[in-house]
Amino acid sequence: MNAIDAFRRFSLSVDIINDNNKQQINRILENISKNIIGASFFEVQFRTKNNKTKNEFLTTIWSNKQDAIGQVFNVRDLDNRLRGQTGYTLERNIKLWIVDEDGGILNEKSNCIDLWSNTDDFPDYWNYLEDMDYRTSIILPLKHVGTHDPIGIVNFEFEDYYKPNPNFKNVFENLSKSITTLLYAYQARHHQSNNTKSAVDEILTLTRKEQYILKKPEIFVAYSSRGLHDVIEIIKEIETEYENKFKFIWWDKISLTGNIDSQLIKAIMGCKLAIIYFSEPKECGGFVDNPNVVFEAGMFHTLSNNDITTEPVYWIPIREQDDSKIPFDFARERIINVQRDKDKSLFSNKLKFAIEQRLKGIRK
């Protein structure tokens, strides 16, 4: 179960939101905003109305900026114009994915475009957090299916420029449904269910680890510096072809200062995928496994066979056919054997096809 699905289940289990779990929900939303979707700012605002004046307001109930919680904003200004894009989302019940047309920082002078609903009559961008520079703003109405008007909005702000796709939209729609359910619970004040505390603990655990859903999955590539370059070139070709789907982390390109072993371990722990080429030639002919590569493979083998990580870890082992005996622990792995002709020339297409088929079979 991923964090977004667990958050949905949690939202359906909550009967009442008191002062205590209201703060815990804010922590959960902070974790989701920071660690799951990589947003720099979020806020959830609920709709209120002055029955005498008919003026409408948005009040912030949850946010990662503590001084924003409790703030109240008029939906319309003194000239009866919608105040900002949050007010527009509330009144029009329209989902917005706002970016500058040229990918620049969003401000009042930006030439903003909406990449979600393709609407073009929304108000100018209003950055009331003047100390932050954002390039993507996502604003969604909070409304239950079958009801007429939203009860509030949720807003996420990102320092990076992002474009939507169906998977990203689905994530944010599921997230908004969960927040809507919680907002109804906050307003309705029903009896609290017995499993609220355990559900809060579960979702807090799931959201503590960084797993930005807008980032491409990272593939760690390990090989011996003495490994045959024709195999390494095939992996580089695959990197070029799959650069829109994966980010390749090459062990020899890690150049940060400090302890190289610590850096390698940190890089490995951050990757859910790996391509491991064990072999290097022996002086007397044939091949042998490089011990450093075996060590790195052992880490991925461990991660892929236990519950250390919340997400599955996959690795693709590659060895020369006439290599020495495979290490015992890796014997059950689906190893790709490098095929060569009598002149030791690589069957490039066969190796490339085998790696690509393995990548296509990996659940991302």
Image: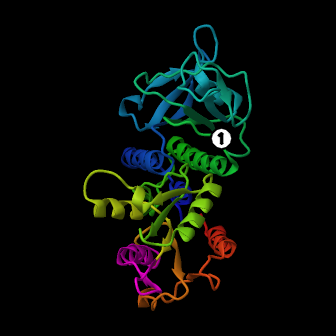
Classify 18 as above or below 152. below
Classify 175 as above or below 252. above
Q: Nearer the viewer, residue 274 or 321?
A: 321
Q: Is residue 313 visible?
A: no
Q: Which picture quadrant has residue 241?
A: bottom right
Q: Is residue 44 visible?
A: yes
Which residue is found at the position 45% from the left and 68% from the top? Answer: 222
Which residue is found at the position 45% from the left and 92% from the top? Answer: 325
The image position of residue 223, as x and y in percent, is 45, 70
The image position of residue 301, as x and y in percent, is 44, 78
Question: Is 306 one of the magenta-colored residues?
Answer: yes
Q: Dot 1: few (<14), some (14–19), or many (≥20) neighbours within 10 Å?
A: many
Q: Nearer the viewer, residue 201 or 362?
A: 362
Q: Check disc 1 and report the residue beneath it.
A: 143
Q: Which picture quadrant has residue 335?
A: bottom right
The image position of residue 41, as x and y in percent, is 46, 36
Residues rendered magenta in the picture? 280-307
Question: Is residue 110 found left or right of 15 in the rendered image?
Answer: right
Kindly state the secondary structure of the residue where label 1 is placed.
loop
* Amino acid at pointer 1: Lys
The image position of residue 233, as x and y in percent, is 57, 64
Q: Nearer the viewer, residue 1 or 251?
A: 251
Classify 39 as above or below 351. above
Q: Which quadrant would the N terminus be assigned to in this image?
A: bottom right
Q: Nearer the viewer, residue 9 or 138?
A: 138
